[in-house]
Image: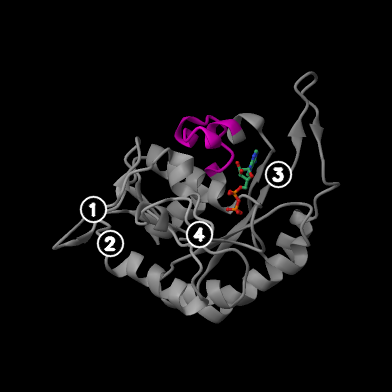
Amino acid sequence: MGVVSGKGGVGKSMTSALLACAMARRGYHCGILDADITGPSIPKLFGIHGRAMADDKGCWPIQSRMGIDVMSINLLVENEEDPVVWRGPVIAGAVKQFWTDVVWKDVDFLFVDMPPGTGDVPLTVFQSLPVDGIVVVASPQELVSMIVAKAVNMAEMMKVPMLGIVENMSYIVCPDCGKHINVFGNSHVDEVAAKHGLPVLAKCPIDPQLAALSDAGMIETYGGEYLEGAADACEKLLKK
Ligand code: ADP
């Protein structure tokens, strides 16, 4: 399952992580392949800082507390603060190895946190992995219509089904009165989704608790069940 976005910082890693948690809670063995090589954030969300080990079977992912298998460039580099300054084809090669040389033992679902954007790097990465479905993450302040159109075109080029759109940072909930405040103005995601015949799988609020848990490496303990619709879409794919 590929998780894509138009640009960085919209919550693509967050969505990949929460979706894997939702599926793990449903009893599936999940993995996350962190293909965002230049901005890897998956290990941090789960509080994983170890070094991945390799043996004659391949390189072993590191398991989160909930049992989600994680592989990321940050589990291979000596110092997780070292930048990765590789060019597109090298990045795509590394991601390909994350698929071919990593022991993804008995995973029911593998979520791929793609490099941001719909340009050369994500496209090459797509070509190096067998992807069964794509979820696009967008925030309301982005040019959602353009981003979704580009993602839809990319999915068509790759002949991979687009499962739907996750709108992140849709609103905040007033802590005093519970009112939803559309910080970035009214969302157009429903119209855009309808235009492409896609479902809106989730609308996630900006939640300070989610940000705090992510910073603390405790994303698995987050209680907001915003991604159940996206989890349903993934589950449907398995049953096909
Ligand atoms: P991307 O993978 O698209 O670059 P991330 O998932 O890493 O984006 O999110 C970027 C930052 O925004 C992170 O610091 C994350 O904690 C924060 N963030 C994302 N979504 C939310 C949300 N719904 N509520 C609060 N903080 C969020």
Q: Earlier in the sequence, mark 4 or mark 3?
A: 4
- Residue 161: x %, y % from top left: 52, 69
User: Tag 4's secondary structure?
Assistant: loop
Q: Earlier in the sequence, mark 1 or mark 3?
A: 1
Respond yes or no on whether mark 3 lies under 8 Å from ligand 1: yes
> Does 214 appear in magenta?
yes
Single out the mark in the foreground, 4 or 3: 4
User: Tag 1's secondary structure?
Assistant: loop
Of residues 99 and 132, the one drawn nearer to the viewer in this rendering: 99
Q: Earlier in the sequence, mark 4 or mark 2?
A: 4
Residue 227's quadrant in the figure? top right
In which quadrant of the rendered image does the C terminus lie? bottom left
Identify which amino acid the numbered label 3 is placed on.
Met
- Residue 217: x %, y % from top left: 47, 36
Q: Quadrant of ligand 1?
A: top right
Query: Which residue is label 2 attached to?
Result: 102
Single out the mark in the foreground, 1 or 3: 1
Point out the stretch of residues depicted in magenta.
212-228
Identify which amino acid the numbered label 1 is placed on.
Met
Q: Earlier in the sequence, mark 4 or mark 1?
A: 1
Real-space CA distance between mark 1 and mark 3, rounded to the nearest whole angstrom: 36 Å
Residue 20 vs 144, above or below: the answer is above
Q: Residue furthest left?
A: 56
- Taking the spot 57% from the left edge, 78% from the top edge, the residue there is 120
Query: Which residue is label 1 attached to?
Result: 53
Is residue 171 visible to the viewer in this orientation of the structure?
Answer: yes
Per the rendering, the mark at residue 169 is: 3
Real-space CA distance between mark 4 and mark 2, rounded to the nearest whole angstrom: 22 Å
Left or right, 3 with reference to 71:
right
Real-space CA distance between mark 4 and mark 3, rounded to the nearest whole angstrom: 28 Å
Query: Which residue is label 4 attached to?
Result: 83
